[in-house]
Amino acid sequence: MPDIAFVKPALPRSGALVLPLAEEAPLAGLAKQADEATGGAISRGLEAAKFKGRKGQATTLWAPGAGLSKVVAIGLGKAAELMATGAEAAGGATAGAIAQEREAMVAADGLAPALAASLAMGVALKSYRFDRYRTMEKEEDKPKIERVAVAVADTAKAKAAFAPLQAVADGVFLTRDLVSEPPNVLTPTDCADRCRALAKLGVEVEILGPKEMKKLGFGALLGVAQGSAQEPRMVVMKWMGAPKGKKGKPLAFIGKGVTFDTGGISIKPAGGMEDMKWDMAGAGTVIGLMAALAGRKAKADVVGIVGLVENMPSGTAQRPGDVVTSASGQTIEVINTDAEGRLVLADVIHYCIEKFDPRFMVDLATLTGAIIIALGHEHAGLFSNDDTLASRIEAAGRATGETAWRMPLGDAYDKQMKSDIADMKNVGGRPGGSITAAQFIQRFVQGRPWAHLDIAGTAWSSKDTATTPKGATAYGVRMLDRLVAEHYEG
Amino acid sequence: MIAVRFRRGAPRPDLPCIVPLDAIAAAPRALAPALAAARFTGAARQVVDLPGTPRRLVVGLGTAPDALACEGAGAAAALAAGASEEVALAGAGLAAGQLAAVAAGIALGAWAFDRHRARDLPRRIRRLVVHCDSPDEAEAAFAHRAPGIGGCLLARDLVAEPANHLTTRRFAERLEALAEDGIEVTIHGRKWLERHGFGALLAVGGGAADPPRLAVLRWRGALPLPPVAFVGKGLVFDTGGISIKPATGMEAMRADMAGAAACAGAMLALARRRSPAPAVAVLAIAENATGAAAYRPGDVIRTASRRTVEVIDTDAEGRLVLADALHHAIAAFRPRAVIDLATLTGAIVTALGHHRAGIFGSDAALLASAAAAGEAVGEPLWPMPIGPTHREALDSDIADLRQCAPAGSGAWGGRFLPDACHAAAFLREFAGTTPWAHLDIAGVDSAEEAHALGPAGPTGFGARLLDRLVALRFEAEP
């Protein structure tokens, strides 16, 4: 990860220079100086490359003179239409273009400080790598970038705008790390231990083990965990940032943390099963979100709770047909042991309500394959019993590029969960599979304001996107940070 | 449809009598003790069967007896009535509009398809006598509803018909019969399709002994405006073709023409109620069979729009025939808007189940009107997305487009593909700039059990929705 600093515009004597340029705009400021210093090589080069500054357009000019190793022009589209997400995307493109340089300067002197900060955020987000387990990577394949100087007219304002973004980026990276870690490393215990590090940021961290959960009557969560040699954990993270006099009910975020999901006795097909290491992405997102909120000292009281288990087939594993009693007292007939995430959430949600009486709850879970069949990988599925909360989440998603698509709930779907022997089954059949999963969870929220994000299609990306290298996306951290910032602080 | 008459006075005591009530307090004094004992609350669609002379079927209207609740009550009562050829409806206390809606619900609930039963023919409701204080008013209100019911039941009849009876030719003949109601019907056969380059429809229908057809139904209306266009998928049977389907459940594929049937039903409704709005339906009729002349995965076909398509899976045939039909609807009629209906994907069933159809499209106002129309007639929709990645999945190595993403592509071992979104992205390419909506009705065309407005079997989903959509959006002068 390179250091990112905001500096006054001054032409660098060496290294790479990145020029974010608006569509059909003449070279100005630092870009113009560079053009003059290179004897017009830049303007001639861009002309020859038919560079117009269109969104997504990029052109590299090698050694144009004045000591510069290269100049990279990145299109911003129309200046009047440039938003934070566009500036971030330009930052992402910048990160790709300068990875093999040691030092680079970005001529953001034409951008407003907030947009320059967003561009810097894009550089940071796209520069992420998870290379802990690479021991033989060739030197020339490793990124070299150490320092990125973002040239802006008003460094103080840009720095101030970037500080909270940096905290959010750190939260994103924590989530990406957790989700990327292999399942033999990131066990429930290991994941819980890593949460302790949040104490440094001022987060109160409490960890509950099987004994405590048994006492709380967590029959649903413990049923999932019982097949694994790994002990389950529940981690409760509290960030009490609301100023005195503005204390109220806390906001609650709840994450599904199945550190590996074999499916249990209802075992999954082998093809693609390795992906199931990221079946804890809901929990990973909540942990990263708590780090982001605490890191930027959000003025809100927020609770993050994650249920961490491993779902394994074994002699002690739960079976299809088992009936378990959840912490709420409601009984569940387990039809399919691979529908385990909702069992974990049922107990954690109940605990959250009893313990914290939250203002609202948002749960995140890589819950169903059906949501991928429904929406693909562009949107998470959003289910909610509260239109205000849902539309705020949708808006926060659009603003951060982590979009959610509202999906329906209703009694007709709820009926699919009826069981012959218990209060409910844990699956409602293939038709409307994500909806019935949400209906199941809704049975535990006691009518409180609640939203459920099914992130099975968005937690992991099989290809690079504008600001995310392929792999763990940390989908949700930025969206929910934004949700808190927009509506629940101050 | 059952015959419905309106009368003053009391019902004949020998006929079962349907008594709609919104609460037990509204019950005639003689019935109150029995209803209380049976725990009748007036809840929507709750039916209590009181034997006697007359036998009474008391049905709840719920707390908000709007038209849809009244229809639901009528349907529930009809389903509970059992083997009676004639029933009465006691209308005291109900407004004419509510009464008409209950009667409409009885007509929907009483629908049955017995054409292929040779013995033990069940007794069905054939006649309804509605008793009320102002029969003329109620009859006028019913006349307003009857066309939509007729359209819906036509769609159910067509969908119920097995594929050896409803061949492509026979389907076209059934549509030609709509001329009686003032609809202009043109059927284009194989030669015409070949001459005009309908490569997609011809490819899909190529494996079958019965040739494909393109049916065009026109209702001229009265407004001096371009028509609204309906486009329907009319696969009289879908084996899947060379990418053949598993045997289990394949018999349901006789309903793969439900989109076309719904469009035909909507046209009938518009004609019968003399809608001022001009409308046209373009129905792509074919049988997707395995055969020596069947099209294959890997084939590249040229659609009527001249765009080329790489075939990946011959069982994703609906979007191909719709591509040609959409093109024709737009090129030949320059419509104000085009709405296509199709039993298109299994993915929409996984996404929305059997309680809502998916709606995709490019025109927010049109989508909102369609959704409102669906809510009003008990055919609910849910908006679904078409995003850039859905379109990217259709990039082909060899042609302008590929028809779908190959199985095995994508994450999670490739088992989970958003095929409904892919299909919608594919169709969008052929809708161009015309305001367009696509309804994927694969989950709602047939019901396994009796539903709110009818018995198990074909629902006719879409016919009433389109009729209502036209009433909501396309009948005003510009």
Image (cartoon, coloured by chain):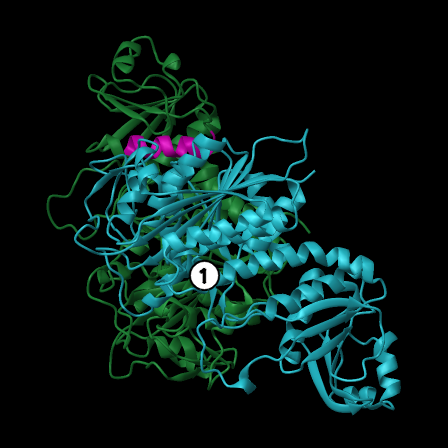
Chain colours: A cyan, B green
Residue B192, percent from left and from top: 43, 79
Q: Residue at x 83, y 69 (%)?
A: A110
User: Is A108 within the magenta?
Assistant: no
Which chain hosts label 1?
A
Residue at mark 1:
A179
Counting from the top left corner in percent of width and height, residue B435 is at 59, 61
The local crowd at label 1, few if under 14, some if 14 to 19, many if 20 or more residues have their Cα within 10 Å, is many
Residue B39 as seen in the image, left or right of residue B23:
left
Left or right: A472, with A338 as reference point: right
Q: Is B451 in front, or is B83?
A: B451
Residue B54 point in image, percent of width and height? 23, 18
Looking at the rendering, which quadrant does residue A468 occupy?
A: bottom right
Which residues fall within the magenta stretch? B66-78
Residue B389 position (above or below residue A267)? below
Please tell me in which quadrant of the rendered image residue B331 appears. Answer: bottom right
Q: Which residue is most to the front?
A: A200
Residue A232 placement, left or right of A4: left
The front one of B390 and A279 is A279
Please state which of residues B362 and A212 is positioned toward the viewer in this rendering: A212
Please identify the residue farthest to the left as the structure is shown: B119
Is A439 placed above or below A80 here?
Answer: above
The amino acid at mark 1 is Val
Of the pair A247 and B189, the residue shown nearer to us? A247
Q: Secondary structure at mark 1?
A: helix
Q: Residue A84 at what x, y percent from top left?
A: 70, 61
Figure check: B97 above or below B363 = above
The image quadrant where one finds the N terminus of chain B is top left
At horizontal 58% and vertical 63% (from top left) the residue drawn is B335
Assign the magenta stretch its main secondary structure.
helix
